[in-house]
Amino acid sequence: MTKIIVLPHIELCPDGAVVEAAVGQTICDALLEGGVEIEHACERSCACTTCHVVVREGGKSLEPAEELEEDLLDKAWGLEPDSRLSCQAVVADTDLVIEIPRYTINMVSEGKK
């Protein structure tokens, strides 16, 4: 099993968290199964940016983002060079350190169309 170390997030995991992930599992699925309630408004279909994470360590083990993910990431709040959509980033056999941005853009919950 691969470890995903989640840096502290004021709302989702104030003390940080460590979750186990199977190789081939997405970061989002592993976080949800591990009790970190990361937002995923599009139900993990790569149609929004609410599951945006920044991979601080271990990112080179992930497959490169596909074009659709890259296009969506351009709309994410707090975009960084190591940003990924956690619903699309598939865990390999290298431990990861991730940060969940403090804010997310959710067009539904913000009342936008």
Image: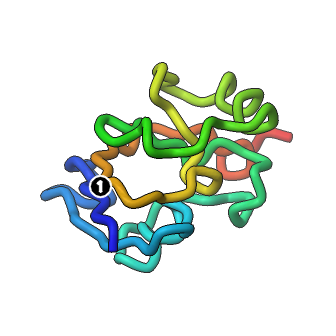
Quarter of the image for the N terminus: give it: bottom left
The residue carrying pointer 1 sits among few (fewer than 14), some (14 to 19) or many (20 or more) residues within 10 Å by Cα, namely some
Could you tell me which residue is drawn at 77 percent across and 59 percent down?
45
Could you tell me which residue is drawn at 79 percent across and 31 percent down?
67
SS for tag 1? loop
Count of residue discs: 1
Task: Decide: is 85 above or below 11.
Answer: above
Which quadrant holds residue 42? bottom right
Q: Is residue 110 left or right of residue 68?
A: left
Seen from the viewer's position, the closer of residues 24 and 101 is 24
Return the x and y of residue 26 as percentages of the image width and height: 55, 63
Seen from the viewer's position, the closer of residues 4 and 35 is 4
Task: Decide: is 66 above or below 16.
Answer: above
Seen from the viewer's position, the closer of residues 67 and 77 is 67
Could you tell me which residue is drawn at 44 percent across and 44 percent down?
61
**Location of mark 1 (residue):** 95
Quarter of the image for the C terminus: give it: top right
Return the x and y of residue 63 as percentages of the image width and height: 59, 43
Q: Is residue 40 left or right of residue 13?
A: right
Going by the picture, which residue comes out furthest to the left? 15
Colour scheme of the picture? rainbow
Going by the picture, which residue comes out furthest to the right? 113
Which amino acid, by three-letter code, is at mark 1? Asp
Return the x and y of residue 91 as percentages of the image width and height: 48, 59
Return the x and y of residue 18 as percentages of the image width and height: 22, 65
